[in-house]
Image: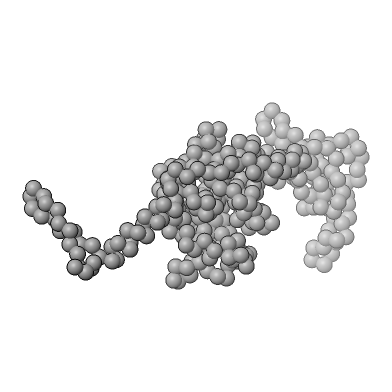
Amino acid sequence: MPLASWEGHAAMITGRLTIRYTPLVIAIGVLNFARASEFPEDKDYGSPERFEKAIRAFEAKDQEEPPQSGAIVCIGSSSIRIWHETISKDLAPLTVIPRGFGGSNMNDALHYADRIVMPYKPRAVVIYEGDNDVAQGIAPKRIAATFRAFVSKVHKHLPETRIYFLSIKPSISRRKLWPQMEEANRLIADECSKGKQLIYVDVASRMLDTDGKPRKDIFQSDNLHMRRSGYVIWRDVLRPILVKMELPFEAQKDADKNPSMADVAACPGFYARRCRRRRAGGTLECRMGMPVEGRLRSDSAGQWRHQPAKRSLRRIKTWRLATRRFGGRQKEIRRIP
């Protein structure tokens, strides 16, 4: 009897069950079995120790230039690392701390969170992982479980920190793995929907063409890493979400640590229209390069007051700044008494 019309019969108490086996059904079964065997549920991650050198480099940089606490940490694999060059500009005016290390996976981010996330006390974390996980044969369920562990670890120390997960991107070189990546994205999106501090950011959809294939114009020659046009997509998707959610906290953070322009203008060492405050230590500096001696300090009521050095009191009261003109005539900039 031909395979297409073969019937197997099974006796049942209530009747007879007929099962038809066709070439299509058998082919689908074989394909699903192959995919299941390719991504075993029990496959483990490799050792994170291979990134020790990269993490120490971050720590050494932190010793030289301590990052500002309460910022947004961006952690992830090479897609984040390559973005280091322009991410601060792309996400301005938000303060970001880029901490991408190429080749990493979700388990590596989990392992090193104690050293490149928690020390900065970030108010938010942007994470991109999962791409290399799938390429290494890690099952989508295992990736989602590791993401949950990452969230738990961060929220154990920083319960109010918001975590933004950038969806795993499609790429030409890993096109065959896209079904597994989609499944991992779906599981993590479901996880994010359960917590108000978790936000799933879909950057993958904009990276597909009308046929549902990865766009060729946004990848480098290796067909894996993105060109600038790819990061423009990420910027246009991520920045509006971050600005909406994080900009109010950015303004509050600056208000807590720095004096307002109104407070600065009220101090005797401020030169109208030509000075600005520097974040480092709250010192004042004239835009024309003339230093304003003394420092800004907060009194018991929380108001910022300027504490001028004695020599500042002997400064002349008027500077003529020839480079600044108003209506074609020079403008005298007077020190506020």
Identify the image's colour scheme: rainbow, by chain, secondary structure or one colour: one colour
Q: Nearer the viewer, residue 124 or 285?
A: 124
Asked if 298 appears above or below 266 in the picture, the reply is above
The quadrant in which the C terminus is found is top right
| Residue under the image location 60 percent in, 42 percent down | 48
Residue 213: image x %, image y %? 47, 68
Given the current orientation, which residue lies at the most extreme left position?
14
| Residue under the image location 91 percent in, 43 percent down | 315
Asked if 306 appears above or below 238 in the picture, the reply is above
Asked if 273 appears above or below 175 in the picture, the reply is above
Residue 57: image x %, image y %? 72, 43
| Residue under the image location 44 percent in, 71 percent down | 211
Given the current orientation, which residue lies at the most extreme top position?
300
Q: Nearer the viewer, residue 318 or 112?
A: 112
Residue 62 lies in what quarter of the image? Answer: top right
Q: Is residue 130 visible?
A: no
Q: Is residue 16 visible?
A: yes
Q: Nearer the viewer, residue 262 or 106?
A: 106
| Residue under the image location 64 percent in, 49 percent down | 101
Left or right, 111 with respect to 182, comes to right
Number of callouts? 0
Residue 282: image x %, image y %? 75, 40
Residue 336: image x %, image y %? 80, 45
Left or right, 255 with respect to 322, comes to left
The quadrant in which the N terminus is found is bottom left
Q: Nearer the viewer, residue 92 or 195?
A: 195
